Image (tube, rainbow, N blue to C red):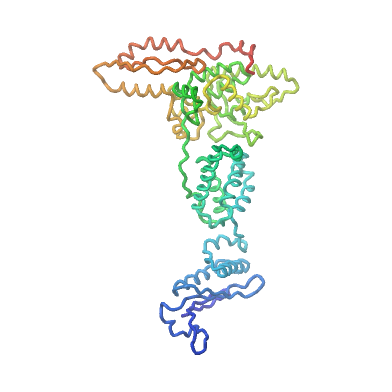
Amino acid sequence: MQSKTADAKGVALGSTFKRCSCRNPATGRPFGKSCPKLSRSEHGTWGYRIELPAAADGERRPRRRTTFDTATAAQDELDLIRRLLAIPRPGDTKALTQVGDLIAEAISNSAPIPDEDTVRRRVRPKGGLRDRVQVGPYFLSWLPQRRKVLSRNTYRSYESHIRLYLVPYLGDIWLDELESADFTLMFERIEEFNDRIEELRNSSDPDHRALVRYRRPVGIASMHRIVATARKGLNDAMHGDGLITLNPAVRVELPPEVRPKPLIWTEARVARWLETGEIPGKVMVWTPEQTGAFLDFIAHHRLYAFFHLLAHAGLRRGEGLGQYWADLDEEAASLAIRFQLLQVGWETEFGTPKTDSSVAIITLDRGTLLELCAHRSRQQREREAAGDAWVDLGLMFTELDGSPLHPAAVTDLFNKLVEEAGSPPIRLHDLRHGAATFALASGADMKVVSSMLRHSSITITADTYTGVLPQVARETAEGIARLVPRKVASVRVLPERPAIEDHPRLGLTSGSQTMIHNDETEKENEPAKYKEAGQLESRPASLEYAARDSNPGPAD
């Protein structure tokens, strides 16, 4: 059975045939097409023959493949080859020759014939085929092309993801053959490496521990960022270069990235920390009393106003270090957030805030405004002392010569001051979380707090600060209880709580008996409650500025 055809482009379109390996017993030669058993469906194999376009050197290329069980299978592959040869535009002999190269290579290596989408993607509009590329070389050539449109930190992040993960684990895979399953396998191998890191860290051999001294496990958040890098690169390969038709990184499934919730340093947690050194969470927040105790301890430090600003207004570290005096409006008690000081590796540079919504004007409380004014007076004295060596950049917070502070040095200073104060440990960024928590505790609406933090979405604020100060949760519970009408007033005494050691520096005192009472009891106790609250009210921030400035103390 044959299906030989002519060809409009001067290229033979081939034909199918059936053959077997039987030999004529009289001559010892193969029967070929004349075997009397070929009419049986189960006897022999089907194949096709085709004359491919001549090679680049002009050599003819007749090719055949004879491995098919049915005529339909042979005809289907022959039809695929015909469609591939029809892809190049008329007159594009270079592309036609290169398509023939792909088909000839597949037949010679007993490999599958390339599919139409793969070949169509490689045909250049101006003629010829694009070279096939592997994942590693593609990403290594893609990244430098993005340098001008990426921030330095983003570029540095992309570079590390490509260098440490995409190239070592996926680099040898052809880009058009990359699948989501390849990412799954990569993360399985990364998890194995994580286990190896933990094993070496816990080894009794110091040499083994030294091998992973500067390595840390790759967490879920980092895995999501690795996929995001791959997704961006592959999107460009799909939409910009047409190298692939689908982005396999879009279909990668990972466990959800859980945003750590802030935990309050409650009395019980502080007691546990004092006893064992154990920190209960990644994001810890001081109570208002603990924050006040820390600020009191550092009140004479030359950078006190910086930490005060972060604790009250919720600025990020880089935003605080990137503040200019020109952006402070004393009359309106407002501060424009327009810049931040970024750390890229160890180098620093000024840039715009994290997101578009981060660029905003915030309102300052009177105490914070007065602290900034006092800080400006102090900076003026430092400027006079520095004389001609002063670097006049107009920054709020600087070194003694007016030059920018280094973000990492400020973080190290904060950690040192926290340790000296005896306060439970938090990160510098946790002052921002504390400002948000205190705002919620004061009764501020979630939308107001989101605006204060300049989040891009209120969802981010709500997801992060679902757990607020214990007293807020208690007031909510009491409010719910007051909605339930009762005819009988109940007064009960809870068992005395175990007391922890008094720690005035942390704003903690020993526990005592606690009363649960109904609405009538609440009203009876209101005068005493408000009197007690008045006694505990903190001093206005405007007091004792002159004394603090004239006696800066040893904390500098």
Give the x, y percent position of residue 430: 52, 27
Is any atom of residue 110 visible in this view? yes
At horizontal 54% and vertical 37% (from top left) the residue drawn is 202
Q: Is residue 453 above or below residue 486?
A: below
Q: How many marks?
A: 0
Give the x, y percent position of residue 36: 44, 85
At horizontal 47% and vertical 73% (from top left) the residue drawn is 68
Q: Residue furthest left?
A: 487
Name the quadrant of the C terminus.
top right
Q: Residue furthest bottom?
A: 26
Q: In front here: 79 or 171?
A: 171
Q: In front here: 257 or 487?
A: 257
At horizontal 41% and vertical 80% (from top left) the residue drawn is 40
Give the x, y percent position of residue 144: 64, 47
Q: In front here: 420 or 204?
A: 204
Relative placement, left or right, of 42 versus 30 is: left
